Amino acid sequence: MSEAASQTPLGDRELAGQLQAARAQVEDQIGRRIVGQREVVELMMISLFSNSHSLLMGVPGLAKTLLVSTLAEALHLRFSRVQFTPDLMPSDITGTDVLSENRETGERCFRFLPGPVFANLVLADEINRAPPKTQAALLQAMQERQVTAGGATHPLPVPFFVFATQNPIEQEGTYPLPEAELDRFMFFIEVPYPDADDEARVVALTTADREERVQPVLEPEPLRRFQELVRRVPAAPEVTRYAVRLARASRPRQEGAADFVREYVSWGAGPRAGQFLILGGKARALMEGRFAASVEDVQALARPVLRHRIVTNYRADLAGVKSTDIVDRLLTEVRP
């Protein structure tokens, strides 16, 4: 037994075992419909146990929507799906006040009618198709986990997290997500094409005469305890400092910034990057049966945490340098 494990309270060790078992059960249910995409599913599970939001990007037909809805079925949580369109209004997401009348007294009053955001797991499908005003309404829900309507504030259910999808190749009728909203997403998850064998299995599975049923295997209360446990997992000071140095190294105006960062980056990652690197590292450690976040955890999550927080400039565009290239180079140059 490791030193960290021996110092962990017995109750937390038992809870960690339950978390690992729950992870295996959820992934087993997802595997009934989703072929492959193990890294994508792992990142979604880390986001789930961290009580954080994630953005999935991939071309059409990669089952992004099916993946999120299947995860929702494997969880005994309230789920809602919002199809984002250019004419979607903020009230279509958050809800609105409606005028109601008491039939006995004839008295009229306004009553708040909750929108689809009042769920535990919200799927924001094709989020970049909504105009900025609508995106701003979702931003408050993601950051503050509450909604303001008609001058009143309404708390959202617990737990609450958003999984959003985005299509990288359709640009007509889309709106770029503002950096403030992107920063609220813990992960930017790229959903890749499946390999040849997996794609053949997808075709066979989706053209069969029956659909695999998914059973809910994780209740809200255990999930809430797992999310609390993640925050109790220790991270050594040197691991935290490494996560912070990695985020700070992406900022071109930071003293001591590398030449390639100054040349290709307009804006680097903010403090949330370090927070999510450590929080995600804690969840990843628990999922693998460890009781402390490590440098390896931080390095494994650097790409999905940092890629959408680094804004490249026109020089990078001309040179074909992407934010993922910046992250990869930072991982080689910033030593633990």
Image (cartoon, rainbow, N blue to C red):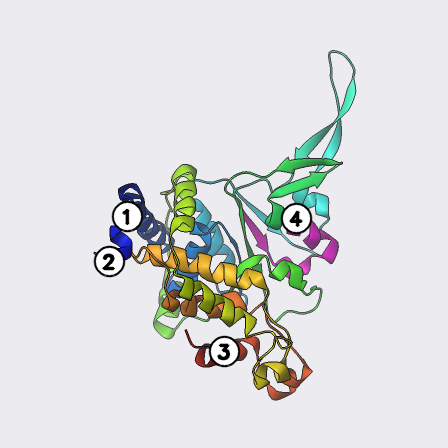
Amino acid identity at mark 1: Gly
Q: Which of the two discs, 1 and 2, labels the residue nearer the N terminus?
A: 2
Q: Residue at x 30, y 45 (%)?
A: 18
Q: 225 and 66: which one is in front?
A: 225
Which residue carries the number 2 mark?
A: 2
Which residue carries the number 4 mark?
A: 140
Q: Which of the two discs, 4 and 1, labels the residue nearer the N terminus?
A: 1
SS at mark 2? loop
Cα gap from disc 2 to disc 3, whole angstroms: 30 Å
Cα gap from disc 3 to disc 1, whole angstroms: 34 Å
Question: Can you tell which mark lies on residue 112?
Answer: none
Q: Pointer 3: residues within 10 angstroms few (<14), some, or many (20+)?
A: many
Q: Nearer the viewer, mark 2 or mark 3?
A: 2
Q: Which of the two discs, 4 and 3, labels the residue nearer the N terminus?
A: 4
Which residue carries the number 1 mark?
A: 17
Amino acid identity at mark 4: Gln
SS at mark 4? helix
- Prevailing SS of the magenta stretch: helix
Question: Can you tell which mark lies on residue 330?
Answer: 3
Amino acid identity at mark 2: Ser
Amino acid identity at mark 3: Leu
Classify residue 264 by image quadrant: bottom right
Q: Nearer the viewer, mark 4 or mark 2?
A: 2
Q: Residue at x 64, y 69 (%)?
A: 170
Q: Nearer the viewer, mark 3 or mark 1?
A: 3
Q: Which of the two discs, 3 and 1, labels the residue nearer the N terminus?
A: 1
Q: Position of residue 181 (x, y in %)?
A: 64, 58
Q: Which of the two discs, 2 and 3, labels the residue nearer the N terminus?
A: 2
- What range is drawn magenta here? 122-140
Question: Quadrant of the image for the C terminus?
Answer: bottom left
Q: 159 and 82: which one is in front?
A: 159
